[in-house]
Structure formats: structure tokens, C-alpha cells
Image (tube, rainbow, N blue to C red):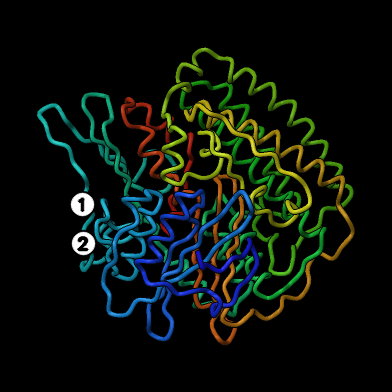
Amino acid sequence: MNWTETKNLKSVSLEDIPQLHMNELRTQIIDGIKNGRRLVQFFGDKKDGRLILYAVLADDLTSRLFIASSKFGNEKEYQSITPEIPAAHLFEREFYEQFGIEPKGHPWLKPVRKGIAGISSEEIPYNFFNMTGEEMHEVGVGPIHAGVIEPGHFRFSCHGEKVYYLEIEHGFQHRGIEDLFVKNYNKSLYLTKLSESVAGDTVIGHAGAFVRAMESLGNTAISRRAQLIRTIMLELERIAVHLGDLSALSGDVAYLTGNSVFGALRTKIINTTMAICGNRFGRGIMTIGGINYDISSKLESEIKSILNRLSDDADLAAEVLFSSASVLERFEQTGVIEKETALEIGMVGPAARSSGISLDIRSDHPFDAYQYFTVHKLTLESGDVFARAYMRFIEIQHSIRIILEQLANLQDGELKCPANSLQPDGMVVSLAEGWRGEIAHVIITNSSGNIKRVKIKDPSFHNWFALALAVREEGVSDFPLCNKSFNLSYCGTDL
């Protein structure tokens, strides 16, 4: 493969990225993935009036990334990759939706974000799959949900209570957020705030990915202290959401003690985040060139005390939760995703690790302070609701240990430094391990060193299809439980 080799957060010149004929690019993507590499990004950009398709593959064992491209002229189609590589299905649908280049032979060429809710009369309405038969029926849920939840539509094809097929429709929160980065390229504070809003429950994950990408393109080096505090904030975000998910999962199986206890523990963590930066979700701490808030010695001592108590409380709550016969009856062997399926569809994050896939960006493509210590990748094999729930508990305890260790290693250093101008005609791939899994931000600059393209991928982009597969052959009443065991982002997919 004659691809540009790089690493996470190592910028490259656009001139160094090879341009292959689309047939050759397709072949090399398929061969690369079948030989152990992984599709990280697949997106288009315009340059000098021509469309260029960029593909990014990852070799997680060697912490390498590979980039190649293909330039389109008058072509309006190419042979789809999806029949060979199912993980490419949503990437190809998105590329077709944005640029009109059809992947011929794609098995499911439907809108990703357009054609939703009659936003434009020019858009083709979404055409749902349907099953026929005298005893078949459909159940439609959303986009307006009974609970406080983001909008999305779920269409179940059922026989009695059994789900045979689930189709998920997105796009109700399509904000054009990638274009907003380009239109406001010279407003650094606005851009950072925008990155915090990609997915509101992943403020540190997305904002961190963005500011690190900008620092890479500007060759801006931040202090070890700033890196450590960023890492601590990311782990606090992970703990908070995992605790909230354990609370919600407990509620879904009517285990009200767990619902209350884990919810109360979550409050302690988000209040800790607020003590650091003034916001329970971590807004405002990230900036291009470092961080805006420090951790004083007094606050450091308080955080240690809170986390030590939380560790004991979470241990006890989890021991009761995961030894309850009524809970286990609902969790075990519900919503199973086998390892082979998880690999085929490109699952990421704790959900993937719950199906036996050893993938964690903190370890495989380290960033910030993760470069300086080992993150042990932990996996489970059953791939069911139980595994996805128990993985959250494992990660809570792991994150507590990481934070306590890094608080003990906080070094003196400046909180932020001036940001440099960006490299002209450059590209950087910024990967991060958010609480849902792999976050990928790609930034491309023009000849003036201004942002001309931002491509964002939330981990939910990979994992929504896993949810659709998880509920097959399950009772429709188990859908809320399966859904909560993934807890995916609607707006992070809609973008």
C-alpha cells in the first residue's frame, strides 16, 4: 500500500497524500481491512473545483494511521465497498448524501441526515424497510419520546412481541456543525465552544479532540501539567456518564435502589468537575494551547478524598446490582452482539470491548498524558447487556485509579500558551477515547493556513447499527434496556 503513514495528532502535508484511482483505492481499503486494519474516516472535500475522497485506516497494533485519496472528475459512481466491508456502509451513505457520488451495489443506500421530517421539499422522504404478513405489525417510536431524550425514530417490525427487524432514522438534529467550523475559522473561542457542543454529554471528549488537532497543525506544545489535567477531566467525564448509565439500567429493570444510588454517586462526580471549572459537564476548561482552570493543592486533596469514598461506594453498589437474580435474569443473554459481528460492523468503545474487541484509543493511539503511562485494555466476551453494564463498572474503577495516580504526578507548568498559526495545506487526524469510544476529528487547512474542512465522527456513528442488530429476536419490551446499554448519541450522529 502506497499510503501516507502517520500517527495520531501528527500533521501531514496534503501534497504527500497519494491520489489513487477509485478502483485501486477501493481494493486497497478492502485488502487493508481484511489484513487487520480499521476504517477510521471516509469523507469528501472540494479542492480547485474537484471532489477528493479521503480514506483513513488505522493499524491499532502499531499505533499507525494511513491516509490515501481519490480525485473525481465527471464520475458519478464507483463500486461500493460495503458488500465486502460492512463497516463502510454508513460512510458511503454519508458520502453519497453530501456529494452525489453513488456507491453502486450498496445494499442499503438511504439518507443519513437528509429527507428527515420534511425539512426540504426537494429531499426524497425516508423509505422504511417493511415486512408483510397477516401477523406482522410495526411499532413506531419517536421522534418525540415520552422521556427527556433526543429526537430519533425507531421502526420495529414485529411478530407478536418478538422483534424481527429494527430500523433507526436520524437527522432530526442536523445542525450543519462541520460547516460552522469552516465559516468561523478565525474565531478560536467560538470554535472551542462549538466543539464542546458536538455531543453535549461528551464535552471533554470532543473539545479535547478538536483543540489537540489545532495544536498539532500549529505545532503548539502544551505543558505536562495541562496534559495531565485534560486527562483527569476526561476520566471524570467517563466516570460520571458510566455511573449515570448504571443508574438508568437499574431503573429499566425496576431495581430502584441501584437507580437511586448510582444516580447520587454521579452527582458527586459532576460536582467535582464543577469545582474544577465551574461547569458540571466540563465546559470552559479546554482551550487551544492548554487549559483555562488549574487544580489547586486544596482541590487536589478534596478530589482524592471524594474518589476514594466513591470507589468503596461504587464497589458495594455494583456488588449488590450484579448479584441480584432479578437483575441478572434481565441482563444476561439479552441483546447479544458476537465478536465476529462487532468486528464486521466496526464497533468501538466499551460496547466493542464488551464483545471481546481489544480496542482503546488511550492505549492504541495515545494522546495527552496517556503517552506517559499504561492504560490496560480490558475486555469481556458475552457481548450482552450484562457485559456492557459490567464494563461500565470496570471502567469506573479503572478511571478512579488513573485520576488518583495522575494527581500524585501533577507537575508545575504553565496552564496555556499562545497558539501558533496553522500549517497551510495540511491535514491532521485527532483520535480520542471518549466514554462511548473512538472520537475522530480530521481538520484540513487551505493554502492560507485557515480551516477549510472539518470531519467529525462520534463513536455512535459506528454503534447505532449494533443496537439495531442487538434487538433482533428479542422482545420489544427489552428495547429500552438494550438501548440504554449502548446509550448512543443522536446529535453526535446528526451533526
Q: Nearer the viewer, residue 236 or 298?
A: 236
Tell me where residue 218 appears, x and y as whole percent.
Answer: 68, 76
Which amino acid, mark 1? Asn
Which label was assigned to residue 124? 2
Query: Which residue is rendered at x = 76% and y = 42% of the image?
Result: 402
Mark 2–mark 1 CB contact (< 8 Å): yes
Tell me where residue 163 appears, x and y as whole percent.
Answer: 28, 30
Query: Which residue is rendered at x = 67% and y = 70% of the image?
Result: 216
**Horizontally, is 231 left or right of 252 in the view?**
right
Farthest-out residue, left: 134
Which label was assigned to residue 127? 1
Sort mark 2 into few (<14), some (14-19) or many (20+) by Cα contacts within 10 Å.
Answer: few
Tell me where residue 325 appears, x and y as whole percent.
Answer: 52, 12
Q: Nearer the viewer, residue 116 or 389?
A: 389
Which amino acid, mark 2? Ile
Considering the image in quadrants, where does the C terminus appear? Answer: bottom left
Q: Residue 451 is drawn in which quadrant?
A: bottom right
Please determine whether, in this image, residue 490 is positioned above or below residue 265: below
**Horizontally, is 380 left or right of 139 in the view?**
right
Question: What secondary structure is marked by label 1?
Answer: loop
Question: What secondary structure is marked by label 2?
Answer: loop
Farthest-out residue, top: 325
Sort mark 1 into few (<14), some (14-19) or many (20+) by Cα contacts within 10 Å.
Answer: few
Which label was assigned to residue 295? none
Please determine whether, in this image, residue 465 is positioned above or below residue 310: below
**Horizontally, is 384 left or right of 374 in the view?**
left
Tell me where residue 417 appears, x and y as whole percent.
Answer: 78, 72
Query: Which residue is rendered at x = 38% and y = 44% of the image?
Result: 465
**Horizontally, is 170 left or right of 244 in the view?**
left
